Image (tube, rainbow, N blue to C red):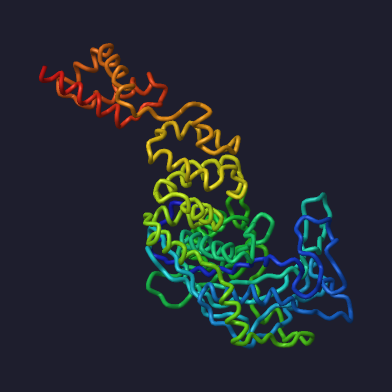
Amino acid sequence: MNYGIDLRNYEAVIGLEVHAQLSTDTKIFCGCSTKFGNPANSNVCPVCLGHPGVLPVLNKKVVEYSVMMGMATGSRINENSIFARKNYFYPDLPKGYQISQFELPICEDGVIKISTEERGAKEIRIKRIHMEEDAGKSIHDRGYDTHVDVNRCGVPLIEIVSEPDISSPEEAYEYLTKLKQILLYLDICDGNMEEGSLRCDANISIRPVGQKELGTRTEVKNMNSFRNVEKAIRFEIERQTELVDDGGKVVQETLLWNADLNEAFPMRGKEESHDYRYFPDPDLVKVVVDEKWKEGLKERLPELPAEKMEKFVNVYNLPEYDASILTLELEVAKYFEECVKYTKDTKSVSNWVMTEILKYLNENKVSIAQFPATPENLAKLVNLINDRTISGKIAKDIFPEMIQGGKSPEVIVKEKNLVQISDDSVLEPVIDEIIATSEKEVKTYLAGKEKAIGALVGKAMKATKGKANPQMVNKLLKEKLEAMKTA
């Protein structure tokens, strides 16, 4: 693959199909558990195994979650939608068909707003959101035999299909990030790609710049992270461009992404809808979502990411960058909002969360729900700095102790006698001693190089074990040194 190939003569046209596993306790058409990690083939019953004579019963919560996702993306909620059978044979599909939605999905015509550094703000249209059941899982890596685990059969999904509005791997990454963020804010999907709770297939084609007609598309599957989606799309754009430039033709096919090799390999010819022989499921009545039901679900919608971002900027007076970081994950945003109940210094709280706390979470691979220091204690730490009880340096020193022992900062400061020294009568003898024993730095300052005062402040802080008020040390040093100029 020639990764240095010139792509300026072509433009990419990308559409994403995202499957989000809904966080219900039971499956979409039966009462079996959806719990991940149970022994293979244990979360099953005659309904999800497709035994003759059984009848599916729709899980109401699946409809509600689907509608909420539609509302959160500005989609039209169809009052009537129907289920269809999607017919195909595969070892992990016991029924020989999958119950999905085809001609009349539950949601249509939504939008996700994204922004990338290269292209700025953009809207990606959502063509449809529909409900369906998941298939099982074929396991190919246990010797020579293929094993089938049908626990996943009947687990509820929504499929979110974008219009081909995405133009680059970066836009795809940003779109997926925004989509996952909304799912997590709604608390309808855990977003775990490694466990298969969130899966993405990418449809990719290229065409000469300015051409309206779409090129032949391929579909890439088997990406287990957003970064791999980004890499796979970039690979396929470059592969198609190189192929066309060499006089070849793109073949419509499905490719599997190999993350170890950073390459995609053909799997099968790309199917079209007629290949699946869709027809309305005769065992399920149409789904009717009336206005009363819609209004009830609208009232249950939480504050969504865009609303929370706006609130962080306009109410908490944070820069947009801070707001974007803090609202990326709902639990982090909640932690921040709990902190600012106890302090007015929202910017300092933001700095602590973005640097010290997120660093701790990344290094220890834990969520903020597992972070030991409470929001109230972090706010107290900020207040202790602001009222000059402790210095910023001391705060950094006691922060690890707050995490390890769960103690409040006041208790640690008291136990270790770390209260900041702000009394002139205590600091003056220290300053006099520093001046008397720092002939080189003093001469440099008196010669007009005022930056030399930094070294003197450092010595004073070291002499007081970091407890001196640095502003007062700086002030006293300046006063005494300036007085020496005129002496």
427 in relation to 325, above or below = above
**Residue 246 seen in render:** no
* Quadrant of the image occupied by residue 211: bottom left
Considering depth in this image, is 257 or 454 the residue closer to the camera? 454
Q: In which quarter of the image is the C terminus?
A: top left
* Quadrant of the image occupied by residue 10: bottom left
165 in relation to 260, above or below = below
Image coordinates of residue 12 in percent, x first then y, are 46, 66
Residue occupying the point 58% across, 65% down: 183
Residue occupying the point 16% across, 20% down: 446
Tell me: 477 left or right of 61. left
Residue occupying the point 54% across, 41% down: 360
* Quadrant of the image occupied by residue 390: top left
Considering depth in this image, is 274 or 266 the residue closer to the camera? 274
Looking at the image, the residue that sits furthest to the left is 486
**Residue 311 seen in render:** yes
Image coordinates of residue 419 in percent, x first then y, are 43, 30
221 in relation to 376, above or below = below
